[in-house]
Amino acid sequence: NPPLAYPAAKTPDDISSGWDGTAIVTSVGLSGELGLDGLPPAYQFRVGDRIGLEEGEARGYYEVVEDAAAAGTEATVTVSPHLHAGIFTNAAVARLWLPVAKLILDWQSWSEETIGGPSQISFTAYQRGI
């Protein structure tokens, strides 16, 4: 899904020409504040947007909990769960377009409804940062 402020976007380029959907992490705060740079000018974050952090093999998946806007190409956003400062540094990349995560599935939580054709499934998964 595209970021919530840009529902018609099909690619990051629809938000800003030449943008690849990522930003540079400039700070990782223990209170959930994430500093970013390299955003499209005046980029808008909405509550519920997802941000993926990538550093080496580590992946983190976060949700924006307060609306925010970039001042120029920089922004500070508050995310949940709190940032894994022991895993991510300002060397991380923030993926705002199609963020990814490493998850561990609870194999006992799997549920599906067999009705023929496509059907719904549900399961519980836990984020694995490293």
Image (cartoon, helix red, strand yellow):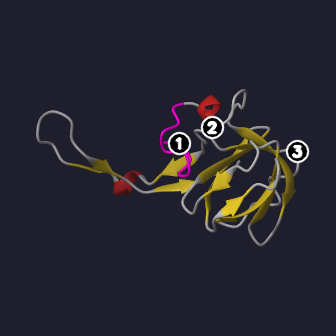
Q: Position of residue 53 (x, y in %)?
A: 72, 47
Residue type, label 2: Ile
Residues rendered magenta in the picture: 1-10
Q: Residue at x 51, y 32 (%)?
A: 10
The local secondary structure at tag 2 comes to loop
User: Which secondary structure type mostly characterizes the magenta part of the structure?
Assistant: loop
| Residue toward you, 96 or 8 | 8
Q: Position of residue 38 (x, y in %)?
A: 82, 42
Instruction: Check the image and name the residue furthest to the left.
Output: 115
Q: Position of residue 20 (x, y in %)?
A: 70, 31
Q: Which mark is residue 91?
A: 3
Q: Does 115 sit left or right of 60 as displayed?
A: left
How far apart, in angstroms, are the residues tagged by discs 2 and 3? 25 Å
Q: Give the residue number, with chain letter if any, for mark 2.
A: 15
Q: Position of residue 89 (x, y in %)?
A: 86, 52
Q: Does 97 sit left or right of 114 as displayed?
A: right
Relative to 82, does residue 19 appear above or below in the rendering? above
Instruction: Check the image and name the residue furthest to the top.
Output: 18
Q: Earlier in the sequence, mark 1 or mark 2?
A: 1
